[in-house]
Amino acid sequence: MNSKVIALVAVSIASVVGIAAFLVFQEGEAQVLSYDGPPKAVIIDQLYDEFPNEQFYERATEYFQIAGYSVDIVKTKDVTVDFYKNLPSMGYKFVVIRTHGAENEDGSNVVLFTGEKYTEKNYIQEQLFGQVKKATPLLEIAYQVNEDENSEWTIVNDTTRILKTPATFVASAENEFFAVSPTLVKDGMKGKFDDTIFILGGCNTLSNPSLAKSLVDRGASKVLGWDNKVGHVDNDYAILLSLESYFQRDNNINDAIDHVSESINTNKMAYPANFKVYPEL
């Protein structure tokens, strides 16, 4: 059965077509691995090749390190299906993901893009059982500022975001990627998370709870994300606000969410969206 999925993340739109099915990947209860040493955090940046943000890495890393975490950064080419399969076994207590996100047209499921180019020959079993899907970003190129007075174009990552006319979109079959679904989290991942906190920095990552619930069922404690499409500038800002609130102000996750909501005026966002948490209190 085919299902069409559409997403906008970091001012992008994606269409995802995949096969939906069910697979019990492994028998028995997955084990939580214990690690000595400081707690570990990871920034998974599927968007690095499109929207690198060195200041974001520096600030986020600073917040983690001051709190006593060791920090890894995983960039586009290393954000693969196999990486996600093994993520629970890596011992991270905090996971931040900058990514393209997508949901089905009926809003029933959310998926995350990898940085791995799609090919029919790879992950055949995972494709057949709906654990991964084919995802094609439709990249938003530019906005025309004032069509009547001049032909100047404001590139999409201009932080002023003074927009007068609709965006121009392009698509290319060369930009097809694998995306991971809640089914991969449920049946394809190895091990369990140990009360890990997730920030899913991408469009629609919490427009429905499917992906967040699958992560919590595998041992995550809280999952933060967006209830609609979101621009990459606003996304990065919200993530840093939440980390600053949690680590520097010693707030809990729910208070950190409130801090983001109080600090960002949705009417001034490139794409209005709300930063949410699952499960809610």
Image (cartoon, rainbow, N blue to C red):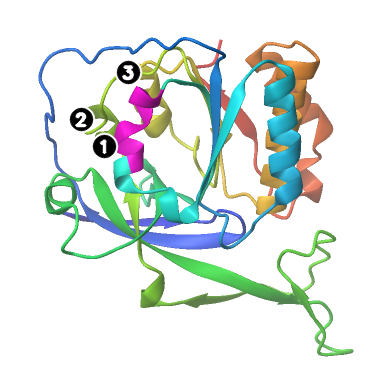
Query: Visible in this render: residue 64?
Result: yes
Q: Secondary structure at mark 1?
A: helix
Determine the CA span between mark 3 and mark 2: 11 Å
Q: In what element is the residue under mark 3? A: loop
Q: Are marks 2 and 1 in contact (CB under 8 Å)?
A: yes
Badge 3 or badge 2: first in the primary sequence: 2
**Majority secondary structure of magenta residues:** helix
> In this picture, which residue range is highlighted in magenta?
83-90
Identify the residue at image location x=14%, y=42%.
21
Outermost residue, right side? 149
Does residue 227 appear left or right of residue 28 in this picture? right
Say whether residue 163 is left or right of residue 47. right
Mark 3 belongs to which amino acid?
A: Lys
Image quadrant holding the C terminus, namely top right
Q: Which residue is mark 2?
A: 187
Q: Can you tell which of label 3 and label 2 is closer to the viewer?
A: 3
**Measuring 64% from the left and 16% from the top, which residue is drawn there?**
253
Instruction: Using the rendered image of the protein, determine whether residue 102 is visible from the camera's viewpoint.
Output: no
Q: Amino acid at mark 2?
A: Asp
Q: Position of residue 148 (x, y in %)?
A: 85, 89
Q: Quadrant of residue 143?
A: bottom right
Q: Residue at x 35, y 41 (%)?
A: 83
As drawn, the label of residue 184 is 1
Crowdedness near tag 2: few (<14), some (14–19) or many (≥20) residues, C-alpha within 10 Å: many
Quadrant housing the N terminus: bottom left
Where does label 3 land, which residue? 192
Q: Is residue 181 magenta?
A: no
Q: For the residue marked with disc 1, what is the amino acid?
A: Leu
Residue 268, how many percent across, how many down? 81, 49
The residue lying at 57 percent from left, 55 percent from top is 48
> Compared to 243, does 136 lie above or below?
below
